[in-house]
Image (spheres, grey):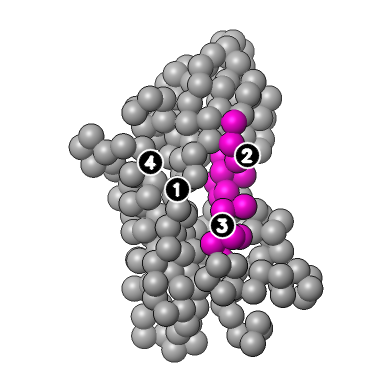
Amino acid sequence: MTVTQKLILASGSPRRVELLAQAGIEPARLLPMDLDETPKRAEHPRSLARRLSAEKAKAALAAVKGEPSWDGSYILAADTVVCVGRRILPKPELVSEASSALHLLSGRSHRVYTGICLVTPDRTIRQKVVDTKVRFKRLSGLDIETYLASGQWRGKAGGYGIQGIAGSFVVKLVGSYTNVVGLPLYETVNLLIGEGYDVHGRWLEG
């Protein structure tokens, strides 16, 4: 029955929770996984997003092992990577890191990759990586200074959140907007539906 299906989101990101809610989906449990996200030597940004989303999903699966109430749950994980060429930008916690990222992004195009990984009730692993191209306007010193003061950059891939003030920096976007926010909705919902999760039933419940 639909009501017995449980979805664990291996993330504590409010943005991902909000995006799922937009699609009528409410995770039964949030299970953030704190992993080392350091890229491997010469690792491509797409490969990093794919690897980290899988590692988060597998870590969440291991965390609920031995908890009968979560047997047969779906587990969804995601990881977003921002890059200029092959240069991977950090998820800054320091103002200096965010400042460097914004100066690099100013007036140029970059790519945002989000890896999504779904563990099904029978423990099959399904993955997809979504790619969006974003171009920023040329940022003035005042743009950067005041954006840094807003604090909206903290912990966000590439040092910005497109759903906030930084949305006004975007000149052009090719691909999925929700991918840049942190969870590509079209691909995520289709992945869930394809693996038997009753998304439409959730819409009726809502």
Per the rendered image, the range of residues in magenta is: 174-192
Whether residue 185 appears in magenta in the rendering, the answer is yes
Residue, disc 1: 129
Question: Element at badge 2?
Answer: helix
Establish if 152 lies above or below 103. below
| The disc label shown at residue 46, or none | 4
- Where residue 181 sits: x, y (%)? 59, 42
Residue, disc 2: 177
The residue type indicated by label 2 comes to Tyr
The residue type indicated by label 1 comes to Val
- Distance from label 1 to label 3 (Cα)? 10 Å
Q: Main secondary structure of the magenta part?
A: helix
The residue type indicated by label 3 comes to Thr
- Distance from label 1 to label 2 (Cα)? 14 Å
- Where residue 115 sits: x, y (%)? 44, 50
| The disc label shown at residue 188, or none | 3
Q: Quadrant of the C terminus?
A: bottom right
**Sequence order check, earlier mark of 4 and 1:** 4
| The disc label shown at residue 66, or none | none
Question: Element at badge 3?
Answer: helix
